[in-house]
Amino acid sequence: MVREMSIQADLQKIRKEKLAPCYLVLGTESFLQDQVRAEILKKIQVTEKDDLNFLRFDMNHSSIEEVIAEAETLPFFGEQRVVFVENPYFLTGEKVTNGMEQNIDLLVDYLKEPLDSTVLVFFAPYEKLDERKKVTKQLKKTAVVINVQQLNEKEVRQYLLNTLENTDITLDRRAIDVFLRLTDLDLSKMMGELEKLVLYGQNQSKITASEVEQLVPKTLEHNIFDMTQYILAGKTDQTLRLFEDLVTQGEEIIKINAILLSQLRLYLQTKFLVKIGYQQANIAETLKIHPYRVKLAMQEARKYDEQKLVRLFDQLVEMDYQIKTGQIEKALSFQLFVLKSGTM
């Protein structure tokens, strides 16, 4: 909640106070980046199509000389002009092949005495910068730093709750859990789907979990998550119905198998790591996946016997091999697997 409050405070400062000569927007959350972009442009009353007082540079294709030349240009018929600098890779330890040679010293000199008439904004979509570099040190010394790193589950949940307070709809805890799962904790996706819920809820304020399931579209991964639950619970009819729906929609059976294998592998890995004392954060770091996926896997894996998970996984591996070597027809193989798993 602290970080979520911090970005709101930063946006409020942009709205209420005079814009600073330089900002560093650091982090990978694209929705929050876009919020900062929109507030700065709104404050200075320019649009992205305005070629007089707004410039955007992608540093994968532009030079620092171009950026500084525009930063040192006085605004036309206004108090300030805005220069957005995208993908400033030279602030990181990233090695760029075939990239142009950048005059870093020129930027360092400008940052020591930036013009008040220019709002120079660096959008750095990275988890961290190379703090050893002179240009990074100078930028952090000069700029107002706005943190837009990806929010964790608790922060996303709080962001959603705060947003819901400004709408006419309510979601109970289960509906919120389903909504967060189907939007993958992605703020951009979450806010887009929330608009649909608000529109749907015009005639009814409370939206249930089942209604969220119907209104928010599922990815293949979401459907396989449901399929995994059906298989483990022995719900043969639901599994086959979902399988047939996915095939009718054009999904490849081999791809369905691969994601199902990946899901069962995650359950087994999670179960093993929990057994030896790992916590959610440790598991996420070890498996290099989002902590929220680990949380869901932990919730599901604890319901089932390890040997059952191993048997299902082994059967899927065997089925995958038979399909790829042409020993059995794909759809028939999957149907036989489901029928066999239902008797375990």
Image (spheres, helix red, strand yellow):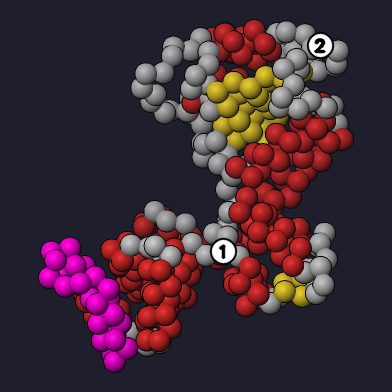
Q: Which mark is on residue 246?
A: none
Compared with 43, 75 (above or below) is: above
Whether residue 155 is visible here, answered yes or no, is: no
Residue 61: x percent and y percent? 49, 19
Q: Residues within 10 Å of mark 2 (few under 14, many from 20)?
A: few
Is 93 positioned to the left or the right of 81 in the image? left
Residue 202: x percent and y percent? 81, 68
Q: Which mark is on residue 76?
A: 2
- Range of residues picked out in magenta: 318-344
Whether residue 323 is visible here, answered yes or no, is: yes
Residue at figure coordinates x 67%, y 32% from the top left? 145
Question: 131 or 69: nearer the eye?
Answer: 69
Main secondary structure type of the part rendered in magenta: helix
The C terminus, quarter of image: bottom left
- Mark 1 highlights which residue? 217
Q: Secondary structure at mark 2?
A: loop
Residue at figure coordinates x 72%, y 74% from the top left? 207
Amino acid type of the residue tagged 2 in the rendering: Phe
Residue at figure coordinates x 38%, y 25% from the top left? 95
